[in-house]
Amino acid sequence: MGATNQTKYPSNLENQKPKIVLTGGGTAGHVSPNLALIPSLEAEGWNVEYIGSSQGIEKQLVEQVGIPYHGISSGKLRRYFS
């Protein structure tokens, strides 16, 4: 008997799309590449959601695309010891 690569999902998950969560923010330098990926991911059957700052520019950019956005509290990364 040969092994198969078929994954068995619980019946309530069989018709659900796989989910991917993208993140990035601040100056939109990480947001732009993520936004460029979204159409391809959706075309391949992914359910795309985004996590970013509650107050950042990424919120406006991602909401324009129409995917779910989850805002979190965040702050600047300080790179000095004082």
Image (cartoon, rainbow, N blue to C red):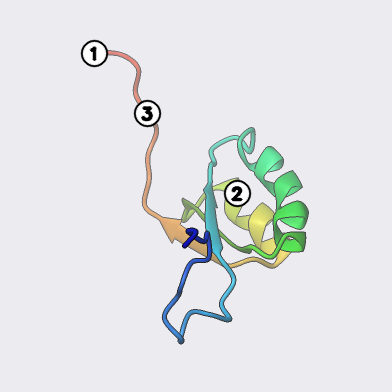
| Quadrant holding the C terminus | top left
Q: Amino acid at mark 2?
A: Glu
Q: What residue is rendered at 60% in x and 49% in y?
A: 58
Residue 58: mark in rendering: 2
Which mark lies nearer to you, 2 or 1?
A: 2
* Element type at mark 1: loop
Q: What amino acid is found at the position of numbered circle 3 in the picture?
A: Leu
Task: State the residue position of label 3.
Answer: 77
Looking at marks 2 and 1 on the same chain, the residue that comes earlier in the sequence is marked by 2
Q: Nearer the viewer, residue 75 or 16?
A: 16
Residue at the (45%, 75%) spot, across then down = 9
Front residue of 2/5: it is 2
Please give the label number shown on residue 27: none
The outermost residue toward the top is: 81
Q: Residue at x 77, y 61 (%)?
A: 43
Left of 11 or right of it: where is 48?
Answer: right
Image x and y of residue 47, in percent: 61, 66
Tell me: 29 left or right of 21.
Answer: right
- Residue 12, horizontal then vertical, whole percent: 46, 86
Question: Circle 1 is placed at which residue position?
Answer: 81
Alpha carbon of mark 1 to alpha carbon of mark 3: how far? 12 Å
Q: Are marks 2 and 3 in contact (CB under 8 Å)?
A: no
